[in-house]
Amino acid sequence: MGFRCAMRSIDSYIFRQTFAAFVLVLVTLTAVIWITQALRGIDVMTGQGQTVLVFVGLTGLAIPYLVLVIAPIALVVAVAYVLNKLSTDSEIIVMNAAGMQPWQLFRPFLFVTTVVSALVFVVSAYVAPDGLRRLKAWQREITADVLSNVLQTGKFVEIERNLTLRVRERQPQGLLVGIFIDDRRDPKERVTIIAERGTILKNDNGSFLILEDGNLQRFEAGRRDPALVVFEQNAFDMSKVGTGAAANISYSIRERYLWELLDPDPEDPMFKQFPGQFRAEMHERLTAPLYPFAFMALTFAFLGAPRTTRQSRAISITSAIISLSALRLLGFACTVLAVKSTYAAPFQYAMLLATIAVSAFVITRVIALEPPPIVLDTLSNAIERISRRFAAT
């Protein structure tokens, strides 16, 4: 009874340490990468006049996809940190001397990995694509509100690529004075509109700019002279860049939910055009929960055995980093090859399962994954000679 209580206490202790380290590393790395990525979209707040809250919301919707990449890495760092701490304090050696089996030490790390894997699965299947969908919808709403909320008087503002607007001044009751529009979205023609004034109209059909007392010049490809139209009132349709097109939103492959990848609509134009990319994305989502198990098992295989010297631990950590990097690079390569090859995805599954199986064998047999003694001696002598040279200088 006392042994079971002790085991539960050890499991709880290791679980808390590992999970806390995982959360800390995940939050820190995600925040750092998010900041670097968010700075690229700073024009949303400065160039288009949006608030800080909108800026944070827009960039924050892409965080789930960062979590997919960072979570396995954060788990590796957490497991390596806890194992190194246990080894440095000689706790692993004491546990082994007390008769603790390798799988018993492995068990709390497995619990943490299960939680991380479930998190990765939920994020990859629903949260990440849903965030990208909301991001697209929010960007369309911002574009629709450009005329009423964002457009700065006296400045040329590029609403979207090849669509530029300028308003000389605003007057009460939403009246815009001195309107200039340059529309080059259609490669076959260019439309330039100048109007004395205009107002904004939003209804179920979309968002419109009602122009009064102006002229429209249409430059068509292949024609030498432009067509000039003078109007008393004209409506410029903003629906194509606003929420009026929300019903016709076409989601990219990364914005599809997992079940939409598993059972795509055969009549979907994007599926007809890119069936290989649908297949590759589906297998990438399905293998995502396996990476935490493979990463953790491989890390434990290198660092879980008792170590007596710092040099041995350093070599084991280096070997683990190299092995994990190779595993992930092979995974990325399989995802790319899966677009055109039907054999790449099965190879990726087999690679991950083989990594887990081999690591489990090493852990249960308490095999220390270390280079041969001759390599350790050569490395030790080289480090000693370099240290002497630096000391002499």
Image: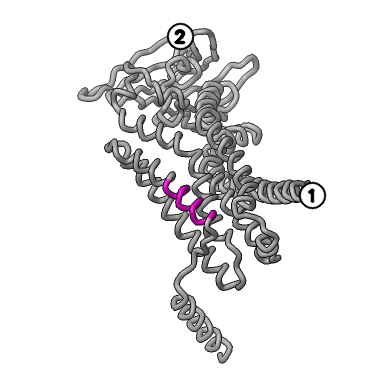
Residue at numbered disc 1: 2
Residue at 46 percent across and 22 percent down: it is 241
For residue 164, above or below residue 106: above
Q: Residues within 10 Å of mark 1 (few under 14, many from 20)?
A: few
Q: Nearer the viewer, residue 73 or 163?
A: 73
Numbered disc in front, either 2 or 1: 1
Q: Which mark is residue 333?
A: none
Secondary structure at numbered mark 1: helix
Residue at numbered disc 2: 233
Secondary structure at numbered mark 2: strand
Going by the numbered disc 1, the residue's amino acid type is Gly
The image quarter in which residue 88 lies: bottom right
Residue at 68 percent across and 63 percent down: it is 97
Residue stretch in magenta: 354-364
Q: Main secondary structure of the magenta part?
A: helix
The image quarter in which residue 345 lies: top left
**Residue 85 visible to an observer of this rendering:** no
Going by the numbered disc 2, the residue's amino acid type is Gln
| Colour approach in the figure | one colour
Left or right, 322 with respect to 39, comes to left
Q: Going from the N terminus, do you reach mark 2 or mark 1 first?
A: 1
